[in-house]
Image: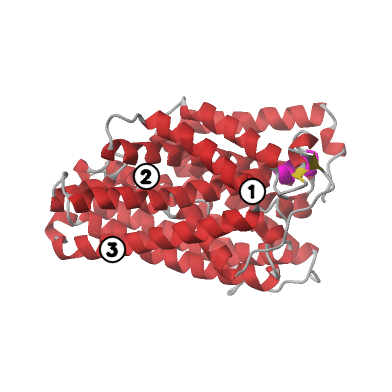
Amino acid sequence: MSATSSASLKKVLKPIHVWAIAVGLVISGEYFGWNYGWGVSGTVGFLIATLLVTTLYVTFIFSFTELTTSIPQAGGPFAYSYRAFGWWGGLIAGYATLVEFLITPPAIAFALGSYTNFLYPSISVLQVAFACYVIFIGINLLGIKESATFSLVVTILAVAELLVYIGIVAPHFSYTTFVKEPMPFGWQGVFAALPFAIWFYLAIEGVAMVAEEVENPKKTISRGYIYGILTLVILALAVMIFTGGVVHWRNLSNIDYPLPAVLGHILGRDSGLTHLFASLGLFGLIASFHGTIIGYSRQIFALARSGYLPSVLGNVNARFQTPHWALLAGGVIGCIALTLGNTNQVIIIAALGAVVMYMISMVALLVLRKKEPDLERPFAVPFYPFFPVTALLLSAICMFAIVYYHFTLSMWFFAGLAILAVGFVISGKHKETGRN
């Protein structure tokens, strides 16, 4: 593979591609992961947590869209925070975003392995997970248009399948089942469930990282984001509510394949329809896995291009115009992560990285409104400053909840940031970094 740092990313993405990437990045969250929230909150407790998080994401996305359309750079949150605060803002946002997008793919890979193992018990979870990294990094190496077209196809299939799932389970919904043990851990459980509710929407902000590859980003990105968040809100609430009204939450709160398990309850585990759904369910997981690979590669690329990571990671392949070293480096880290921890822990770390990034992004939005009042803003957040302040406060509540209930994991996250910051200053890199 030949590469050159002078090659640039290719602008080919249209609104439908942006919608597909936005929804595809997230849609695996409707298939698994969120159900762990039931284990700490019950159904009604988790519904309350989900409504709080839904409010967070709606206000955040409308606010974040202003940043993305005003500063359409591959660094996304890193670029906005650097512009608002300088090197230290870029460092915090870049670290938090990178953790989120490097840690999320292993969780999805675990779920892909679990779904496959549900269908074919002779195939191990890790075998499938490692194979996914090899296959989808390969697809991403071929070019962003090819990757986005693939995302569009699998995302449409994943959305269609969730609608079919809702149609099958809705007639079996029982209000009595849904409200049985509704809040066994009280309000404390609601706060403990917040990181799992975040999983419903986690990574939608990854669209910002393909901003340099979008045709007419100042109009296209806002449409993709807004249609994307509306799609996800409807799917998340419908899947969670109908699922909780069919099977008691305690039977689903600790597995990586809740939807096939519910269909197995209704149709029989050995039913052809159950197996067909589990097979098709892989589309949702594939869409998110593929999308998060795009996300982490562009974040590594942007950080390397600005001097925060080794410059070789900022090289672009001359033939395919993709950041190939960034793709490969993130894949190696992801495969290492597969051998450590479990899905529960991975979701918590990814959610922590996300909310830290949301907080600094919202503060950057407020600062840039004052610091650069003449900056062209093709999309202005509605109800300013209410939306960004609401997103900031809800993100802070989520961060404190995660730290309180998962203190050791959180300390590992913040220790990593502290070590990186100290090393950055000692090496003098903070004097060399700059926007590109």
- Rendered image: mark on residue 295: none
Sequence-earlier tag: 3 or 2 = 2
Which amino acid does the dot numbered 3 rest on?
Val
Q: CA distance from mark 3 to mark 1?
A: 32 Å
Number of residue marks? 3
Residue 237 relative to residue 74: left or right: left
Answer above or below: position of 410 versus 90.
above
Q: Quadrant of the N terminus?
A: top right
Sequence-earlier tag: 3 or 1 = 1
Q: Quadrant of residue 233?
A: bottom left
Secondary structure under tag 1 reads: loop
**Which residue in the structure is indicated by mark 3?**
164
Q: CA distance from mark 3 to mark 2?
A: 20 Å
- Rendered image: mark on residue 142: 1
Q: CA distance from mark 1 to mark 2?
A: 30 Å
Which amino acid does the dot numbered 1 rest on?
Leu
Mark 3 or 2, closer to the camera: 3
